[in-house]
Amino acid sequence: MTITKYFISQCSLYLLVYFSPLLLLPFKPSSNLSINFTTISYLIGAGLLIFFSHSLKEVPAIEQKALTTPRKEIILWGVYGLFLAFLTQIIAGSIDRLLWDSGQSQNTLNIAQLIRSSPFFLIAVSIAGPIMEEFIFRRSLISFLSQYVTPILAAIISSLLFALVHADGHLLVYFSMAMVFYFLYQKTGSIWTSIIAHCAMNFIVMLLQLNLS
């Protein structure tokens, strides 16, 4: 499968999973049923994105390095990336509050509330969701855009879209986080490096949010 076909198929699958909870609306489901259905959809979506990732026959330029990067280094940079991501979030969050007097992320608060209603949703937030986002915004989109623009410009465009999709007003924070995940991805050439950091960060952030509120 070419990079373009891979990008189209991956994005189509992601959108299908993202909007799949709408299928329940005619049945007026309970809140817990909707949350559990969403979690299962995300898990299936993440699994399918991983499965079909091997269908890409063209090796993206950014992944050439992965051919010689030891697995240990891929994992270690994922762990290092967790601390780098937290530091970046603190700095970007401070700038965000200073310039725009923004409060806490409404997106995080809403997700925490859903997890309280159904703890099962934590799996979607800390595992399935980050896996899908990394495959779409880092691997698929950046590989596709890099055919037409420089990799760094592709990363900037991808990061802007990543921030806009989260749509809670903290664009600088989400953009900065996305650029960190791009840095980790290109550092080892393996998407699993950014996935490790992204999953770990989401998990820790949600645990802290649940304990603080």
Image (spheres, helix red, strand yellow):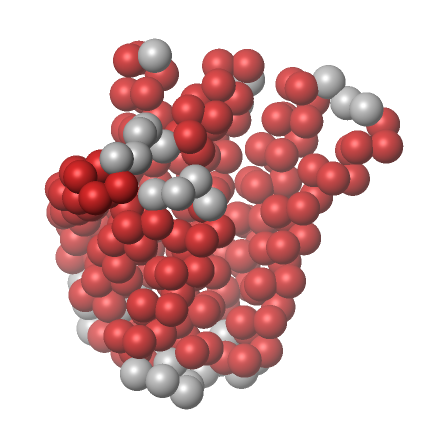
Query: Residue 111: where, in percent of width, then height?
Result: 47, 27
Q: Residue at x 17, y 39 (%)?
A: 98
Q: Residue furthest bottom?
A: 148
Query: Residue 149: where, in percent of width, then height?
Result: 36, 85
Q: Residue at x 32, y 28 (%)?
A: 104
Front residue (pair 107, 127)? 107
Q: Residue at x 44, y 60 (%)?
A: 161
Hey, which quadrant is residue 213 in on the image? Answer: top left
Q: Residue furthest right?
A: 26
Left or right position of 80 against 28:
left
Q: Residue at x 64, y 48 (%)?
A: 17
Left or right position of 70 against 161:
left
57 vs 174: above or below: below
Query: Residue 84: where, in percent of width, then height?
Result: 14, 47
Left or right position of 150 against 164:
left
> Is residue 82 visible to the viewer in this orientation of the structure?
no
179 vs 173: above or below: below
Query: Residue 189: where, in percent of width, then height?
Result: 26, 68
164 vs 90: above or below: below
Front residue (pair 154, 13)? 154
